[in-house]
Amino acid sequence: MAPKKGSAKKAAAAPNKNWEAGLATAQLEEESWRACVCLVVGSSGEDEELMEALALAVQRPQRQLFTLLTWDNTLTKIHELGNPKTKKPDDVPMFYEVTESAMLLLDAGEEIPCDLMAKILKFQLLDIKARDQQRRAAKQANDEPDDGPQHYVLVLGFYQPQLLGLLDAIGVHVANVIKLCSEHRKTCEVRQEQQRTSEGNEQSQSMSPDLDAETKLSTDVDMRYYSNLLDLVPPEACSVPLILHCVLEQ
């Protein structure tokens, strides 16, 4: 008996029980596809504006060889694929099961540990690789350079230093750590330091003449010889020239 029309449906993606081992050993780079993964960090909260400007520049349509991998879109991916009760799309990426482990922790109000976050990042990098390879296969014009990496991934919003070693352990090499810093802020800090140093020098220089003046203009003078000279003359005989003479003698 022929099957009824419309009874054939695509089976939903079955969970892979061995996803963790498969994700750890999955090869990100190969001879025909290489990635340059860069971790972008800032030196202070003020540098978040620089990251936003960088993100806007990378997201332009002309930047097809660049992909942003941020903390925000990672959380979005976890919420999209991490609920085991929701129906997964037909084109669900491989190793999506890692998002379910993260979703359980987030629902419990706990933080995602670094080792699990490294696996989530690799899962997303493998998805970026698959989509980029599909784009290249569908593209007719071969106007992209043959040398160098096939794709550049900028990782933003992740500040755990342990991630570098954990990613390397599962086959993801971070090529660069890019530290963004505002030159204007650094220039202002240098100028403020120079101004404080200059004010300190001026203050010390202005205090030195006062100290010298206090030493030279001291009123502690030995008046004994002057007094002895005046005592030799009767008071009624004292005159201004005589007093001046005694001062000069003193």
Image: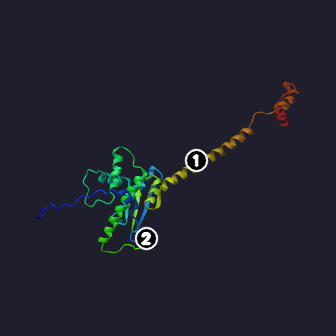
Q: Position of residue 67 (x, y in %)?
A: 37, 62
The residue positioned 33% from the left and 49% from the top of the image is: 103
38 in relation to 188, above or below: below
Between 146 and 1, the one nearer to me in the picture? 1
Q: Residues within 10 Å of mark 2 (few under 14, many from 20)?
A: few
> Residue pushed farthest front?
1
Disc sitting over residue 196 in the figure:
1
User: Does residue 200 appear in the picture of this structure?
Assistant: yes
Q: Position of residue 203 (x, y in %)?
A: 63, 44
Q: Position of residue 32 (x, y in %)?
A: 39, 71
Q: Position of residue 104 (x, y in %)?
A: 34, 47
The residue positioned 51% from the left and 54% from the top of the image is: 186
Give the structural element (helix, strand or loop) at label 1: helix
The answer to whether 237 appears left or right of 123 in the picture is: right
Amino acid type indicated by mark 1: Arg
Give the image quarter of residue 23: bottom left
User: Does residue 56 appear in the picture of this structure?
Assistant: no
Colour mapping used in the image: rainbow
93 in relation to 101, above or below: below
Tell which tag, 2 or 1, sits nearer the viewer: 2
Residue of label 2: 148
Give the image quarter of residue 6: bottom left
Amino acid type indicated by mark 2: Gly
